[in-house]
Image: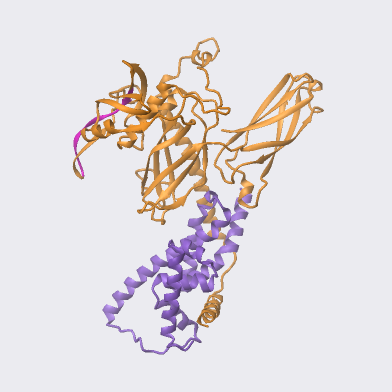
């Protein structure tokens, strides 16, 4: 009886409050907030890319032009790309396994800082039956800080033209009897970390290539740290590639998880896609900078990553129109999203046009230009978009068939 | 962009009136309720593109509003304690409640602890299932049962067992 009374009285009191169904001023403010979110997404991508370039000194490593209009010599001698795994896992060279193990050991000992300035991977070399994995570590010691005397490491600076650290720290690692182990620790490491590093061990197992985030930190944003909007939380992380480089297979699906003080999941971001590592410098990792909403009592975070197994966009109803301009044909297609809604992933779709014998006459690619099916915000699947390609083929009368394929990028 | 703007308009029309009234029942202050609902909408709008399930916007908005009401209630409690000390006011708890009056219903709600009050409003006004109330309040469904049960008992006691 009292339940019915509560329903009636609360409903009556609530109904006594007049509430408009629109408020342009509030919606304008909300729109600005949404725009900031989109801008932040752009900043995330830019930060990851520039972070990678800066942290690795890739700009320095770019080989000089050949001077004759050709691509630099590095591009003329691309290393072989590991193929996409068919049914069995891809074989990762032991040197790459050694590097991955060493990076995981550093992360386990808390030595990978979220800005990627400390213990940057530089190279791995075979040495007397072991693997010697080198890092640009830092100046480790006891420093006078605001909170007192602390043992910590500070990044090396001014060591090369970009100010990147040169190598000064080495882990000797080896695989034996089914496990990877740290054999010795040399160079700039805090004393307290040496024991942890020497005790670190992992099973020697085959893993499908993927990105992982050994270090993820959460901070309140501030203007000093470039906080997005004064609210929410700043998330920083360093990612590491597990697998051979370069790798020609699919990338990784990752999802940021927010945790409360009890380790309970209180925030789950949408998934996003990260392309596989294609360049050797990517072994050195790159920096993630993103955010999470405030007010959820988030105190920690992790990034859950797994090899991407989805299908992304799939082209259907490909139409070839060869009656158009003199040297071009039009290819129209519908693409349907075959994955979860709101996967943050750009895609590149390519149309190819063939002659009667199956010979390729021409191709054109389009970036889909959005990061997830926008229609998924407002309706249920199927999520379908239309694409129109203009393909230069020389003689349109030779064009017989066309196909369209898409891949996440 | 136009779709996104239209989307926000639609989200406002669909969710903000209900959330405003929930905030009103939780704070007892009409102007404050509108401010809280608007603040919650603006905060939640930054997340609308990141929700895995777009239909989760309403729950997220409600949760944000309830949290803002809680903060407002905490501030108001501090202010009230200060005023009571200053004016040496003593609340007359023996006054019989006239449940026919809107203000008195609000006063009756105001006497409840914030989480009990929120649980009653979300259950008996917003008509949310216990699982969603748990999500909004950040607790287990079993806790919601307990909050509702204790809230009802407290209301019944204030009403002097007349219902």
| A379 horizontally vs A203: left or right | right
In front here: A191 or A404? A191
In front here: B23 or B83? B23
| A276 horizontally vs A385: left or right | left
Q: What type of secondary structure mainly makes up the magenta span?
A: strand
Residue A408: where, in percent of width, then height? 58, 34
Q: Residue at x 53, y 38 (%)?
A: A273
Residue A105 in sight from this viewpoint: yes
Residue A177: where, in percent of width, then height? 36, 26
Residue B107 in sight from this viewpoint: no
Would you say residue A332 sits in the magenta stretch?
no
Residue at far top of view: A68
Whether A150 is drawn above or below A178: the answer is: below
Q: Residue at x 75, y 30 (%)?
A: A330
Would you say residue A134 sits in the magenta stretch?
yes
Chain A: give its colour: orange
Q: Residue at x 50, y 40 (%)?
A: A42
The magenta span reads A133-146
Residue at far front of view: A177
**Colour purple maps to chain:** B
């Amino acid at each position: 009886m009292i339940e019915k009374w509560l329903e009636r009285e609360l409903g009556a009191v609530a109904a006594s409050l007049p509430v408009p169904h629109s408020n342009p001023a509030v919606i304008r403010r909300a729109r600005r907030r949404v725009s900031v979110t989109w801008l932040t997404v752009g900043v995330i991508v830019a930060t990851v890319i520039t972070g990678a370039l800066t942290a690795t000194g890739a700009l320095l490593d770019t080989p000089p032009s050949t001077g004759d209009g050709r691509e630099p010599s590095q591009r003329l001698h691309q290393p072989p790309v590991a193929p996409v795994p068919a049914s069995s896992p891809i074989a990762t060279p032991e040197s790459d396994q050694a590097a991955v193990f060493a990076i995981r050991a550093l992360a386990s000992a808390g030595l990978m800082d979220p800005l990627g300035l400390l213990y940057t991977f530089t190279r791995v070399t075979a040495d007397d039956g072991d693997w010697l994995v080198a890092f640009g570590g830092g100046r480790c010691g006891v420093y006078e800080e605001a909170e007192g005397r602390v043992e910590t490491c500070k990044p090396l600076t001014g060591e090369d033209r970009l100010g990147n650290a040169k190598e000064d720290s080495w882990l000797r690692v080896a695989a034996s009897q089914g496990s990877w182990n740290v054999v010795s620790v040399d160079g700039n490491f805090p004393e307290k970390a040496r024991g942890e590093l020497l005790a670190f061990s992992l099973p020697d197992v085959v893993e499908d290539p993927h990105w992982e985030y050994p270090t993820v930190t959460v901070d309140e944003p501030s203007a000093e740290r470039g906080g997005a909007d004064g609210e929410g939380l700043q998330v920083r992380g360093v990612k590491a590639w597990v697998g051979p480089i370069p790798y020609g297979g699919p990338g990784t699906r990752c999802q940021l998880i927010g945790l409360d003080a009890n380790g309970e999941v209180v925030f789950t971001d949408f998934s996003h896609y990260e392309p596989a590592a294609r360049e050797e410098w990517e072994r050195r990792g790159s920096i993630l900078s993103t955010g999470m909403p405030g007010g959820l009592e988030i105190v920690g975070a992790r990034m859950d990553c797994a090899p991407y197994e989805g299908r992304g966009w799939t082209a259907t109803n490909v139409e070839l129109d060869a009656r158009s301009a003199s040297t071009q044909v039009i290819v129209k297609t519908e693409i349907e999203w075959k994955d979860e809604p709101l996967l943050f992933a750009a895609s590149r779709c390519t149309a190819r046009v063939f002659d009667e014998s199956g010979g390729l006459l021409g191709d054109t690619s389009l970036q889909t230009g959005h990061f997830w099916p926008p229609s998924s915000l407002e309706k249920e699947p199927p999520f379908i978009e239309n694409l129109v390609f203009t393909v230069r083929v020389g003689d349109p009368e030779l064009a017989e068939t066309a196909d369209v394929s898409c891949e996440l990028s | 962009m136009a779709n996104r703007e239209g989307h926000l308009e639609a989200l406002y029309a669909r969710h903000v009136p209900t959330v405003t009234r929930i905030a009103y029942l939780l704070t007892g202050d009409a102007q404050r309720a509108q401010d809280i609902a608007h603040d919650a909408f603006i905060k939640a709008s930054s997340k609308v593109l990141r929700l895995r399930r777009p239909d989760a916007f309403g729950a997220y908005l409600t949760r944000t509003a309830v949290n803002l009401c809680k903060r407002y209630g905490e501030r108001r409690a501090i202010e009230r304690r200060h005023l009571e000390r200053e004016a040496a006011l003593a609340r007359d708890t023996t006054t019989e409640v006239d449940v026919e009056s809107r203000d008195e219903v609000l006063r009756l709600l105001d006497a409840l602890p914030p989480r009990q009050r929120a649980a009653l409003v979300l259950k008996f006004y917003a008509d949310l299932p216990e699982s969603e109330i748990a999500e909004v309040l950040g607790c287990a469904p079993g806790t919601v049962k307990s909050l509702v049960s204790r809230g009802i008992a407290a209301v019944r006691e204030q009403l002097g067992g007349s219902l």
